[in-house]
Image (spheres, helix red, strand yellow):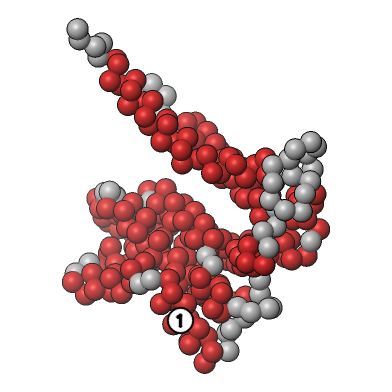
Amino acid sequence: MTLPKSVPGNILRGLAWAGVLFLIAPLLVVIPVSFTPERYLSFPSEALSLRHYETLLFDRRWSGGILTSLLIASITTVLSVVIGTLCAVGMWRIGGRRMQLLRLMILAPLIVPSIVHALAFYKSWIDLGWLDTVWGVIVAHTTICVPLVMITVSAALSGFDHRLEYAARSLGARPLTVLRRIILPNILPGVVSGGIFAFITSWDEIIVILFITARKVRTLPQTIWSSIMERVDPAVAAISTVMVAATLAAVIIKLTLAKRAAPQP
């Protein structure tokens, strides 16, 4: 007896969906926990409560951490996109072995463990007087995020047609004009992807933060860390639910825009 050809495919799909559910199950658990009326982590037994979401808005520790992380991540993203894109385009234009060595040096933050970054930043920031300052955190995060932008932009440049640049230059376009009107529009998906990676990395970074900040600067990951170390506050589940919802919304928006931009048959 032979099985229909569709049976193996259905089994693979079932296993794939089972794997997806296994991965997202821990994320789904925090949603009901965030509505508990208790002061400790527990599933709501009788009534649902929004008290922990109110904590995120009205507790200065949580609201200040969210705003600080948003400010740092936004500025870090802008700086990382500008620096990383210019570095990737410059190395792509020049080429050669020296540029390959320079590329390896710039990508070193992705290879070195985070604890090594933290120690290096801590020692350097002491000498510069940047400890426990917002700009000190922004510079550290930018150093970490620039390689991420470089990777995505370099991948986009690998598929760029050089003849478009040569045609623009032959028609008298200046280098900045070629960059702004020819190169950047064609590598925009790589630039946007790099910006997203930079924002997420800066938003979630905790190891370097623990080394170079103390009391004046408190980001959201640091607030979550402190809450877990002192006592497990259900507000952690609330902020986790908000971040899951924001991520799903961003994915849906991206898929919708990609579907609209796709050529119609």
Q: Quadrant of the N terminus?
A: top left
Q: Viewed as shown, does residue 262 lie left or right of 220?
A: left
Specify the farthest residue to the top: 1
Q: Secondary structure at mark 1?
A: helix
Residue depicted at x 35% and y 59%: 151
Residue 252 placement (x, y as % from top left)? 54, 36
Residue depicted at x 62% and y 45%: 30
Residue depicted at x 52% and y 39%: 25
Disc 1 packing (10 Å; few <14; some 14–19; many ≥20): some
Query: Which sits in the foreground, 176 or 46?
Result: 46
Residue depicted at x 48% and y 87%: 124
* 107 up-or-down from 247: above or below: below
Q: Disc count in the image?
A: 1
The residue type indicated by label 1 comes to Leu
* 62 up-or-down from 106: above or below: above
**Location of residue 119 (image quadrant):** bottom left
**Is residue 194 at all visible to an observer of this figure?**
yes
Residue 57 placement (x, y as % from top left)? 77, 55
**Location of residue 16 (image quadrant):** top left
Query: Which sits in the foreground, 251 or 156?
Result: 251
In this figure, which residue is indicated by the disc labeled 1?
A: 119
**Location of residue 89 (image quadrant):** bottom left
**Is residue 258 at all visible to an observer of this figure?**
no
Query: Which sits in the foreground, 206 or 102?
Result: 206
Q: Viewed as shown, does residue 145 lie left or right of 64?
A: left
Residue 123 placement (x, y as % from top left)? 48, 87
Specify the farthest residue to the bottom: 127
Residue 226 placement (x, y as % from top left)? 64, 67
Q: Viewed as shown, does residue 128 lie left or right of 44?
A: left
Q: Quadrant of the C terminus?
A: top left
Q: Viewed as shown, does residue 52 lie left or right of 212?
A: right
